[in-house]
Image (spheres, rainbow, N blue to C red):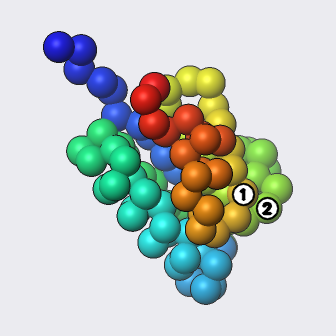
Amino acid sequence: MNQEKPKKLVLYVAGQTPKSLAAISNLRRICEEHLPGRYEIDVVDLRENPKLAREHNIVAIPTLVRELPVPLRKIIGDLSDEEKVLVNLRLENE
């Protein structure tokens, strides 16, 4: 049986704003439902380290980046549209 590598997801937020908190919550729920045990989430607060926005080409927040598997994919927003997240980041059946 083929052992699937975990998806590496990085969520860029700015503090504990309602939109940031919603994005974190929505991402965790989506991953638990569709990728149980097959994902890794890093949450990066750009208020704590603003230079990362430029280094990682983050133009809006919250932004979710799928770093692995390559190619890198991004989606902006609070991740409330589950189908949009799954399709744009290709989280299912990859």
Question: As shown in the figure, which amino acid type bears the numbered disc 2?
Answer: Ala
- Residue drawn at 37 percent across, 47 percent down: 34
Give the total of numbered labels: 2
Question: As shown in the figure, which amino acid type bears the numbered disc 1?
Answer: Ile
- Residue drawn at 34 percent across, 34 percent down: 6
Above or below, 21 relative to 66 = below
Q: Residues within 10 Å of mark 1 (few under 14, many from 20)?
A: some
- Find out whether the residues at labels 2 and 1 contact each other: C-beta distance under 8 Å: yes
Q: Which quadrant of the rendered structure holds the N terminus?
A: top left
Of all residues shown, which one is farthest toward the front?
A: 83
Of all residues shown, which one is farthest toward the top?
A: 1
Residue 61, percent from left and from top = 72, 65
Q: Which residue is mark 1?
A: 76
Residue 38's disc number: none
Residue 17, percent from left and from top = 62, 84
- CA separation, marks 2 and 1? 7 Å
Q: Residues within 10 Å of mark 2 (few under 14, many from 20)?
A: few
- Residue drawn at 34 percent across, 55 percent down: 33
Q: Of 71 and 47, which appears nearest the observer?
A: 71
Tell me, yes or no, if residue 40 can be seen here. Answer: yes
Above or below, 89 relative to 41 = above
Q: Quadrant of residue 50?
A: bottom right
Image side of residue 44 versus residue 14, left or right: left
Q: Nearer the viewer, mark 2 or mark 1?
A: 1
Of all residues shown, which one is farthest toward the right?
A: 59
**Mark 2 vs mark 1: which is more N-terminal?**
2
Q: Element type at marker 1?
A: strand
Q: Which residue is mark 2?
A: 60
Image side of residue 12 versus residue 51, left or right: left
Residue 78, percent from left and from top = 63, 69
